[in-house]
Each structure stands twice: as structure tokens, then as C-alpha cells.
Image (cartoon, coloured by chain):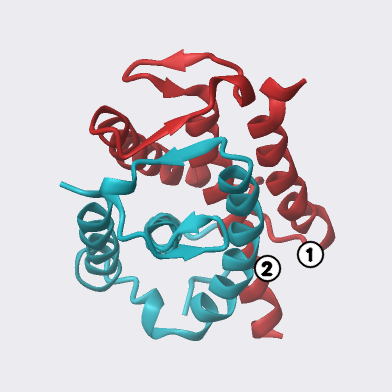
Chain colours: A cyan, B red
Amino acid sequence: MTYTVAVVLGATGALLLDLVVLRTRLVLGRVFWVTYPIVLAGQLLANGILTGRRIVRYDPHAILGLWVDYAPVEDLAFGFALVLTTLAIWVRLGRATPPPSAPPPR
Amino acid sequence: MAHLTYLAVLAGCLLGAVWLEPVLRVGVLRQWRRLLLTLVPVVLVFGGWDVAAIAAHHWSYDRAQTTGVLLPGRLPLEELLFFVVIPVCAILGFEAVRKRLRR
């Protein structure tokens, strides 16, 4: 399996987690899509350093070969999967045990 | 100092977001149990993916720019921290946005 295939599976898995498994439906709401571009900007900066300085190196055979600054385009989907998975679990746990000072999520 | 480069990037990410806790009072770090319960599955799943990708040679890490501390599965220490730092930053950002949009 290439990184390309793995990342398509990973992003799909994150979407299924959000929409079907945990039913947090973050991708259908506003908060996620306001948050995501901010996180993405941070990712482009941090990942730009990690890949630009070649701290992380990719096997050219494992990727499509499309680059977003110095990083393979696959990294964008990896970041999306990581962030969506994290936020879906976080929001789901917030529903299970709402802290006294925070109202439940939308 | 070059071997601390990756760690410095992670520290930069954390500094870029952690101020939201005291300034906007997002209350993320305060809910440390919920945060821990979120991080455990994320670290396991994405750390597992990383280990598999390293084994499949999808990517590798420059020994000169990392501490060289390798965890089981040849996972660099920095990668484990990455899967803690980035989720914490994302949650801080998410809660900050949620708080601002609610007003």
C-alpha cells in the first residue's frame, strides 16, 4: 500500500468516525470549518519546516508526486484525518460528561 | 543543536496555541481527563500508522535533526510528541472558535 492509498483510507475513516460512528457531525457544522483553515495554516508552516529542511523524507514511490510547498499533497489529507479524528473524539467525550462550566456542543 | 530542530518545531506549535487557554479561557487543559481520553486513541491509531509507514519505507527521519531517541517500531520520540502536540493545538483552536462564535 502506498502513502496515497493509506491516506485516502485514513481520511475516509475519519469522516466515517465523525458522521456514522460517533455521530458528532463536525464536518456538517460551522465551528469545524472555521477552525480547520487556522489549523491548516499552522500545518503548512510547521510541516513546511519539517519537509523543507528534510527532517522528514518521503519515498517517491509511495506518493503521487504532487507537492504543496515542500510537502507531498498526501500530508494535507493526513492532517485532515488527524484533526477530524481528534476533534470528533473530544466533542463526543464532552457530550458524555459535560463539564459544569461548558454547555454541550451544538 | 541541529538534533533539536524537530523538537523546536513542536515547541513552536504548542506556543502558537497554548496562550488560548489563559487568554480566551477555553478550559481545554483544565479538562485534563477528557483531553487524556482523547489523546490515547489518537496516539495509538496515528502512532500505529506511523510505525507501519516507517516499516513500509513511506517516509524516514533525519537522524541529524532529531534526538535519535527511538521508541518501539523505530518511532522517533518527536513523532509521539507530534501526535500529542498537534491534537492539543487543534482542540485549543476548536474551543476558541466555538467560544467566539457563540458570543
Pointers 1 and 2 in contact (C-beta within 8 Å): yes
| Badge 2 amino acid | Ala
Report the disc number at residue B88. none
- Locate residue A71, reporting x and y percent: 50, 55
Q: In which quarter of the image is residue A39?
A: bottom right
Report the disc number at residue B96. 2
Image side of residue B77 versus residue A48, left or right = left
**Badge 1 local density, few (<14 within 10 Å), some, or many (20+)?**
some
Report the disc number at residue B24. 1
| Badge 1 amino acid | Leu
Mark found first going from the N terminus, 1 or 2: 1
- Locate residue A4, reporting x and y percent: 26, 57
Q: Is residue A59 above or below residue B89?
A: above
Q: Nearer the viewer, residue A18 or A102?
A: A18
Q: Please, what secondary structure does the residue beneath circle 1 have?
A: loop
Residue lying at 20% horizontally and 59% vertically, measured from the top left? A9
* Label 1 and label 2 in one chain: yes
For residue A76, say whether it is visible. Answer: yes
Q: Is residue A104 above or below residue B19?
A: below
Residue lying at 20% horizontally and 57% vertically, measured from the top left? A5
Residue lying at 23% horizontally and 60% vertically, measured from the top left? A13
Q: Which of B89 and A95 is in front in this view?
A: B89
Image side of residue B38 versus residue B67, left or right = left
Alpha-carbon distance for marks 1 and 2?
7 Å
Residue lying at 54% horizontally and 79% vertically, measured from the top left? A31
Q: Please, what secondary structure does the residue beneath circle 2 have?
A: helix
**Badge 2 local density, few (<14 within 10 Å), some, or many (20+)?**
many
Outermost left residue: A1
- Locate residue A70, reporting x and y percent: 55, 55
> The residue marked by circle 1 belongs to what chain?
B
Q: Is residue B40 above or below residue B70?
A: below
